[in-house]
Amino acid sequence: MIYIGAEEIISPLGKSAEENFSAILANRSGISLADHAGFNGDSVYISKILDLSEENKFENLITTVLNQVIIKIDNKIVSSERTVVLLSSTKGDLDNNINDQFGKTIATLTTQFNLANQPIVVSNACISGVLAINTAGNFIESGLYDHVIVIGCDLISNFVLFGFQSLFAISNQPCTPFDASRNGITMGEGCGALVISNSKMIFKEQPLKLLSGTSANDANHISGPSRTGEGLYRSVKRTMEMNDLLPADIDFISAHGTGTIYNDEMESIAFDRSNLTPIPLNSFKGYFGHTLGAAGVIETAISMQMLRNQMLIKSPGFETTGTSKELNIVKENKPANLRTILKTASGFGGGNASLLIQKI
Amino acid sequence: MSFITAYCHITSDSCLVNGEEIVTRDSLSNDSWLKQIYKSQEFVYPKFYKMDSLAQAGFLASELIKRAQPNLSAYQDDEIAMLFGNQYSSAESDIRFKKSYEEHGAPSPALFVYTLPNIVLGEIAILNKWFGENLFVVLPKFAPDFFVSYAKILMSKGSEAVLCGWLGIGEERSDVFLFLVEKQGNAGMEFNAGNLHKLAGFELV
């Protein structure tokens, strides 16, 4: 069995997974209006961590989150020869060193935490986080490593904000995934982490079970979602088949749900083709914004909190169906029997990925 | 067992398939080095001109591998995985995109879409209609052990072949090395870290 636990989140909503979950239960969102932050001096909604220094923020977030994770596991694991760290990120430390966006952070991690193995950066646009967790699961299953610490982190910079503005992809309101009024994404920044292991004993708190999943390219367009949801459909199909699960076995779907017209429509088609439309589903983007390479890790970590707390969490910003296939979008927080959660992600470069987590 | 059944290098001045040089860089040409390879090998794929150098290098090397190993088309559309990596992510495109809004008036969407290192995987998947597994990693240097371990994991989980690539490409240098790994290989070399180290040819330390 592959165990997953020791999840942590640092976001505008809090400095730990528990703080973030409490904030969500209290219907808070990290999104606020940033005056004159846009390319033409326009004000833009973003989810930014305002109470931490901008200096060395990327590296500081990662070392802070790793220290928090270590408290939740056997403290010898981090520097073990049987452990590797996977860092999931798209733009890394771009503002400090555009020529080498990961080198310094990796070197700092290696020395500061006395890591035995070279950390590996997974950089696959918005599916990086889900892909990193699946890669970790594959490492454990094959016996290559016994423990993997996955850390996802991305920051809001002029670079990414202006870039998405140039694509006309930024929402003029806090993003409203799957809603009829949606018109784009809200950028977010944050850091998430979790531990995947072949041993239950290393976790101080009861871990959950990871059923590793798959990825599939949709071979359609480098920056536009497939009209048929082919890649997401194939990834979900393979992930469910590999783990011998049927749609009725899934209790909740943490979808990607960016809030753009085409992405959310594509997801609805893929879920319809997968016979998953009756399953309760949300997008966490209305709480955290789109945290790019961190999104898959943060959203998996919050899904783990849902399993621990047996609570369904609503999809903020959703009121009226805005996709051609109707989904069962969660409209209010409520207690529920949750055993198995499907997490999906889709992104630029045609990537789609999915995984499953289960209460033991 | 698995085998390296074809490979392609694009160094700073030479393009080789299975170790045989097929194009030599003409330092007097007005064309970029990657465009020289495109023209000399008579490729016709107009999207090539829109791509950044990471995607151009991936396109050229993967097409040359296909020419050397034409039976690739016998695989199902989701049986070929891609496992790529490099040292500096998409730094070259990142620098160009940053210049677009800092020096040239407005952020360029055409440049922005190439500011992710995995876009090259999308370009190759689109061209070939491949729906398989994809992974792009950033590592300080080419790591034969990682590629061997992970390609074997992918092949134990449903992939029949893995197109692997190291795209060490920058303004001054080119360390591009793509190789195809298949479960069956008539004339191939056994897929292990020692052989991969030997074939890679470029400085690994």
Image: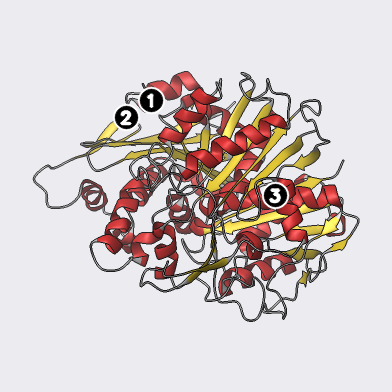
The N terminus of chain A lies in quadrant: top right
User: Do callouts 2 and 3 point to residues on the same chain?
Assistant: no
- Res A214 label: none
Q: Nearer the viewer, mark 1 or mark 3?
A: 3
Q: Is residue A331 above or below residue A160?
A: below
Residue tagged 1: B199
Visible residue check, residue A162? yes
Amino acid under disc 2: Gly
Visible residue check, residue A169? no
Q: Nearer the viewer, residue A158 or B58?
A: A158
Q: Residue at x 33, y 66 (%)?
A: B108
Residue B150 percent location from the top left of the image: 57, 32
Q: Which chain is mark 2 on?
A: B
In terms of secondary structure, where does tag 3 sit?
Answer: helix
Q: Nearer the viewer, mark 1 or mark 2?
A: 1
Tag 2–tag 3 contact (CB < 8 Å): no
Residue tagged 2: B19
Mark 2 and mark 3: span between their CA atoms?
45 Å
Mark 1 or mark 2, earlier in chain: 2
Amino acid under disc 1: Leu
User: Do callouts 1 and 3 point to residues on the same chain?
Assistant: no
In terms of secondary structure, where does tag 1 sit?
Answer: helix
Residue tagged 3: A300
What is the quadrant of residue A138 in the picture?
top right
Residue A302 percent location from the top left of the image: 72, 51
In terms of secondary structure, where does tag 2 sit?
Answer: loop
Mark 1 and mark 2: span between their CA atoms?
8 Å
Q: Which chain is mark 3 on?
A: A
